[in-house]
Image (cartoon, rainbow, N blue to C red):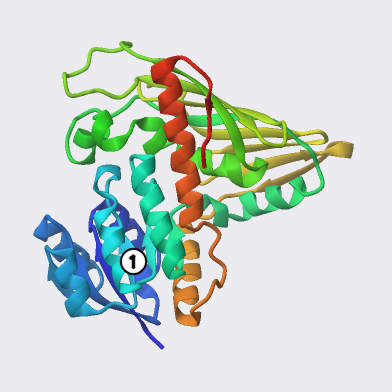
Amino acid sequence: MKVKLAFIGCGGITRSHLEQGLKEFEDVQFVGWCDVNEKAAIARREQAGGRGEVYTDARRMLDEAKPDAVYIMLPPFAHGPAEQLAIERGIPFFVEKPVAKDLDTALRVAEGVERHNLITSVGYMNRYRRSVRRVRELLEGRKPVIMHGGWLGGGPAKYEGIWRWWVQKDKSGGQFLEQTTHTIDLARHLFGEVEEIYAVPVRDRLPRPDFFTIEDASMVQMSFVNGAAANLYSSCCTSVGGGISLTLWATDMKAEFTGWEHSVRIYLPGDEQITIPGEPNVFALEDRAFIDSVKAGEDRGILATYEDGLKAVAIACAADESMRTGKAVEVKV
């Protein structure tokens, strides 16, 4: 069986999924490419060997191409309508993170997914890494204590392409929601559900254009239901010494994740150390799990569902509320 696959949104993230293995899947038939920028849709079709039709209207594509599954690869502000189109037609979907800019949109989509019992997958690719899976295994039976980590960088050099909307709060939701969402998800995945958030914004560190409305940086304190705690940070104004990292401690272990690839060094009692490098083509792992699940009509290895995406949005929205009010905020989902 070949899975007929269509795409809503044909930008850089779609390109990455294709080049990291999806275009080589022998059990996938590409049937549709939809983007408001027709040139982007044409480019992705060419990347996949000219397979499938190009569209600028998602409704028309779903009705004409009749895919078995759809990839929804959109900016935060554009989520909602595309997911509803898939839900109305009972089409399983893979959606890139974050699943929405606001909690109301994510809740509406989650309700539709549950009502139709749809197979979904969210692009939290780090869950599929050997490094993350090993740390999660080692945490079983141990008490988590604290963690810290996040995404630090200097921000965009030019406000072009995605960087034009990325720096606008009403479009991206801010760095913590749009980018550090990967670390938010890992915090939940490894330490459990989050109970309360207290967040502090940092602004006015660098000269910015008027349309730059996101925070320059933020510090987000997270309290977990099980009593553990975390501090996640984000910055787009620190051009020296940045990067992606996450360090966590349980009562008798420590794990240090470093880099986009999330290589890890694990420290255990008796001076035991384990080092696991990150995989280069991790998108292929989550794509394989999603395609296998669509073929089977049931979960065959999906590690992040729409519910996980919803909960990551809930945490980010609680942090945003805390930054606005200066108060601790309960996570409501």
Q: Residue furthest bottom?
A: 1
- Sort mark 1 into few (<14), some (14-19) or many (20+) by Cα contacts within 10 Å: many
- Which residue is found at the position 85% from the left and 37% from the top? 271
At numbered mark 1, what does the secondary structure look like: helix, strand or loop? helix
Q: Which residue lies furthest to the right in this view?
A: 270
Q: Which of 139 and 263 is in front in this view?
A: 139
- Which residue is found at the position 36% from the left and 43% from the top? 104
Q: Which of 316 and 258 is in front in this view?
A: 316
> Where is residue 205, by image quadrant?
top left
Residue 65, given in percent of the width and then of the height, sits at 21, 78
- Left or right for 54, reference 330: left
Q: Is residue 219 above or below residue 33?
A: above
The residue pinned by badge 1 equals: 87
Residue 298, given in percent of the width and then of the height, sits at 53, 75
The quadrant of the image that shows the N terminus is bottom left
Residue 149, given in percent of the width and then of the height, sits at 56, 30
- Left or right for 320, reference 252: left
Look at label 1 and name its amino acid: Ile
- Which residue is found at the position 34% from the left and 78% from the top? 68
- Left or right for 87, reference 234: left
Q: Is residue 176 visible?
A: yes
Q: Is residue 50 visible?
A: no
- Left or right for 115, reference 263: left
